[in-house]
Amino acid sequence: MKDLALVLWLVCAVCELGAAIQAYGHGFAGARFFPATLSTDDPFVADELSLPTVSTIRTPDDGGTGATGISVDIAKRITPQFGIEIGETFTSLNPREGRATNSFGNLELGGKYQLLNNGPHEAIISLGLGLEVGGTGASSVGADSF
């Protein structure tokens, strides 16, 4: 079994390296690179796939509840300045006592418009709008119905 896991890992590593023949940063304004960070969103319109993004936390309340979220986000450029985004999160809530709850949250939609990309001044201005479609997720995992 250990050998099978090693072979599977090697096959996945080779496939990943083969898929990444060329990669370019898409966040440049002149000589400045604008990365997406934990506190700021990516200011550039681009084709992106985040598959999957996993987060886990245990709350500090009585006994604690384990919360695991698995998110998928897709962003598609429609024009060089405009793009749309769609995302969904599967949430698993596991209290120390009681029954576990697993379900999807609300569907998330968004749009982004790049107003300005000024290379000589290394500046960018983008306008974005994000929303949740109420009632598309389960209230048992905290999805609002609005």
Image: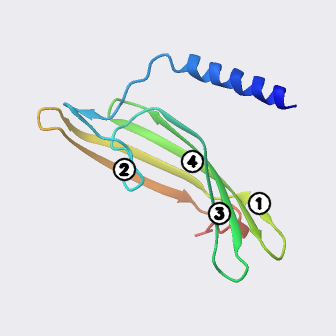
In the displayed structure, would residue 98 be above or below residue 71?
below
Q: Residue at x 34, y 29 (%)?
A: 80
Q: Earlier in the sequence, mark 1 or mark 3?
A: 1
**Which residue is label 3 attached to?**
135
Q: Viewer-proximal residue, 40 or 143? A: 40
- Of 98 and 58, the residue lying toward us: 58
- Indicate the position of residue 3 as horizontal and vertical percent values: 82, 26
In the structure shown, which secondary structural element does the residue marked by tag 3 occupy?
A: loop
Going by the numbered disc 3, the residue's amino acid type is Gly
The location of residue 66, given as percent across then percent down, is 70, 67
Q: Tell me which corner region of the image, top left, top right, bottom left or bottom right, holds residue 78.
A: top left
Quick one: 83 or 3, which is closer to the camera? 3
Q: Is residue 47 above or below residue 55?
A: above
Q: Which residue is mark 2?
A: 128
Instruction: Please name which of the two marks, 1 or 3, marks the residue nearer to the observer.
Output: 1
Q: Amino acid at mark 2?
A: Gly
**Which of the image's four quarters has the C terminus?**
bottom right
**C-alpha separation, residue under disc 1 versus residue under disc 3:** 16 Å
Q: Which residue is mark 4?
A: 87
**Badges 4 and 1: C-beta atoms under 8 Å apart?**
no
Report the mark closest to the observer, 1 or 2. 1
Tell me the CA gap for discs 3 and 4: 15 Å
Q: Are marks 1 and 2 in contact (CB under 8 Å)?
A: no
Query: Which of the marked residues, 4 or 1, is nearer the chain's N terminus?
Result: 4
